[in-house]
Image (cartoon, rainbow, N blue to C red):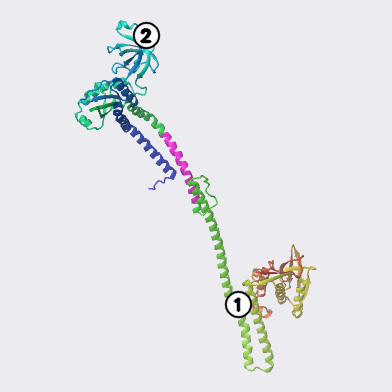
């Protein structure tokens, strides 16, 4: 079974989704099982720090219950906890942490707020020092300074309080201690639990009481059996006036319980929406991250196939952009290196082909030299042996002429071979100059007068007047000698050889045409090869070394000439071009090494 191949987009999308989903699930699990514990530990730690500083503040107070009530009330509001103080016998001190103090008839009256009878709703909202209020209540001492309130209002009620045995006081608040608005739930009820529930519970905890006497903190989670609300309890032992005392703090855990419950309900509704958002964000995130990778992958794939025409187009200023720039630089260097290698391979191939051609030419040259020298050497040897055998006197003179003739032919062959080897080695130094080519043609024609006369061949020359060419006169004379000699050798007796010149753009095309046998069309391009002859059986009769046209080819190539051989109606015509020089004189020289 073929294994399914997943691309990087799918992998990153799946990994991102799974990772974030697991993280979200861990958050939900943490909220469900650990958030309440974290809140409890944080609340206990806060209470413990506040309770640790309470003994020092308590010790600084004068023996005044009202001052202690105020200190405890301040601590309760700051920590959102109910505070109780018990002595070493676990007897709870009577504390009234909430009160209103007013000045009535030039004396201070303290209105204590009972924890059990009062509710937060019984107090007018937003009471501050300086507010005028009316209180209906009962005095609790003989000096009429402490009143137990029954009703508290900002405005004086219309009812007659004397009928109910109550006393009404209307005055301005000079000092107050009320439950803070930041207190959770009903603080009066929570504070009353300290006396009604915590006292009896402490008497049953003998092991923990023993632990308290050793000076350790005690913390415990407690559930109110009436309301079912969870509370945290922290107890701390401290010394006061030589005796052992205990401060006990109770704080509700109901807010965190409500929050956990609300979060759980919220999660049930939010989870599907979050999953959809998570899917979209994971997909977008994977595309954003992987798109540069896909682009770089395509670029690398093209580079692997040696295609450097399209470069990576990532221009961001991050690792992807830097990698893209490095890949583009690498592609450029690889492309240039491959071009250099191809160029080097072409050069190497050309060198190998040239060496192979030179080797073939060498072998062919050796074979041709052997063939060309074999016949004259055989003739020389035969006639020399005849002279050695003392042939008849009248034959000696003819034998000597034949030997000298064959030696001259071998010398001519060797000289042409040396000349050709220089051309093939590209060791010829041209001496270009401007000169009238007609003078060279006339001089060469004069040197062939005897041969022309022997074959009764007429020479007809037709050249433009006053033409100068830019070439090496010595080498051009060599070309004309070879071409004219070749035309004379292969011309029919009593025929005509024509030498003409025609202007073609900036050149002069020279043409040497004879009347004689045609060259087969398939051999017209091979006649420029060394030792090549159309009819090798007749070369001894017509003369020539078979190297003249090869030498002409090299000379004309060095001059950049356009040369050709073609069959005409009556014979064969050879043509070549030379650059016409209209401005330079005959004394201007230029040296070139080809």
179 is higher (above) or lower (below) than 464: above
Between 452 and 277, the one lying in front of the other is 277
Q: Name the one closer to the observer, 452 or 252.
A: 252
Indicate the position of residue 235 as horizontal and vertical percent values. 26, 29
Q: Is residue 211 visible from the viewing direction of this image?
A: yes
Q: Residue 257 location in percent, x, y?
A: 32, 27
Quick check: is 290 in the magenta stretch? yes
The residue singled out by tag 2 in the image is 157
Q: Nearer the viewer, mark 2 or mark 1?
A: 2
Residue 22 x %, y %:
36, 38
Does the magenta portion include 78?
no
Closer to the chain start, of discs 2 and 1, is: 2
| Pointer 1 residue | 368
Q: Visible in this render: residue 519?
A: no
| Label drawn at residue 443 | none
Quarter that holds the C terminus: bottom right
């Amino acid at each position: 079974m073929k294994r399914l191949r997943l691309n990087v987009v799918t992998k990153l999308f799946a990994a991102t989704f799974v990772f974030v989903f697991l993280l979200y699930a861990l958050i939900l699990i943490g909220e469900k099982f650990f958030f309440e514990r974290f809140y409890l530990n944080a609340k206990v730690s806060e209470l413990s720090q506040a309770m640790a500083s309470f003994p020092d503040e308590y010790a600084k107070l004068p023996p005044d219950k009202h001052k202690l009530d105020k200190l405890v009330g301040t601590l309760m509001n700051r920590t959102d906890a109910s505070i109780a103080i018990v002595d070493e016998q676990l007897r709870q001190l009577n504390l009234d942490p909430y009160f209103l103090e007013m000045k009535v008839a030039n004396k201070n009256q303290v209105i204590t707020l009972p924890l059990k009878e009062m509710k937060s709703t019984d107090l007018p909202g937003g009471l501050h020092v300086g507010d005028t209020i009316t209180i209906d209540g009962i005095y609790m001492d003989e000096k009429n300074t402490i009143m137990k309130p029954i009703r508290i209002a900002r405005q004086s009620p219309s009812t007659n309080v004397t009928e109910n045995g109550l006393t009404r006081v209307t005055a301005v608040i000079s000092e107050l201690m009320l439950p803070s608005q930041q207190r959770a739930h009903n603080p009066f009820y929570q504070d009353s639990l300290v006396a009604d529930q915590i006292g009896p519970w402490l008497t049953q905890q003998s092991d923990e009481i023993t632990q308290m006497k050793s000076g350790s903190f005690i913390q415990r989670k407690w559930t109110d059996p009436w309301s079912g609300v969870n509370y945290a309890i922290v107890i701390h032992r401290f010394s006061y006036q030589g005796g052992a005392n205990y401060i006990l703090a109770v704080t509700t855990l109901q807010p965190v319980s409500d929050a956990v419950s609300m979060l759980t309900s919220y999660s049930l509704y939010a989870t599907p929406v979050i999953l959809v958002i998570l899917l979209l964000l994971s997909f977008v995130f994977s595309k954003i991250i992987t798109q540069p990778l896909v682009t770089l992958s395509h670029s690398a794939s093209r580079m692997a196939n040696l295609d450097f025409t399209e470069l990576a187009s990532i221009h961001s200023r991050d690792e992807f952009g830097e990698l893209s720039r490095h890949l583009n630089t690498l592609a450029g260097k690889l492309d240039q290196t491959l071009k250099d290698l191809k160029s080097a391979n072409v050069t190497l191939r050309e060198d190998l082909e040239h060496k192979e051609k030179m080797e073939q030419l060498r072998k062919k040259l050796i074979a041709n030299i052997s063939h060309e020298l074999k016949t004259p050497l055989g003739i020389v040897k035969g006639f020399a042996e005849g002279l050695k055998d003392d042939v008849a006197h009248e034959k000696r003179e003819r034998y000597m002429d034949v030997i000298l003739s064959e030696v001259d032919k071998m010398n001519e062959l060797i000289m042409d071979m040396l000349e050709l080897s220089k051309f093939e080695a590209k060791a010829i130094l041209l001496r270009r100059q401007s000169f009238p080519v007609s003078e060279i043609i006339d001089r060469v024609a004069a040197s062939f007068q005897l041969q022309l006369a022997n074959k009764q061949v007429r020479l007809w020359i037709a050249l433009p007047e006053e033409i100068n060419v830019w070439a090496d006169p010595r080498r051009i004379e060599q070309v004309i000698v070879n071409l004219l000699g070749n035309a004379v050798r292969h011309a029919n007796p009593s025929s005509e050889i024509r030498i003409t010149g025609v202007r073609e753009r900036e050149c002069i095309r020279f043409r040497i045409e004879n009347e004689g046998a045609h060259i087969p069309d398939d051999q017209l391009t091979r006649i420029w090869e060394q030792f090549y002859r159309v009819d090798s059986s007749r070369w001894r009769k017509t003369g020539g070394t078979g190297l003249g046209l090869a030498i002409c080819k090299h000379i004309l190539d060095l001059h950049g000439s356009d040369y050709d051989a073609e069959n005409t109606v009556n014979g064969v015509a050879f043509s070549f071009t030379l650059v016409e020089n209209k401005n330079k004189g005959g004394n201007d020289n230029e040296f070139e090494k080809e």
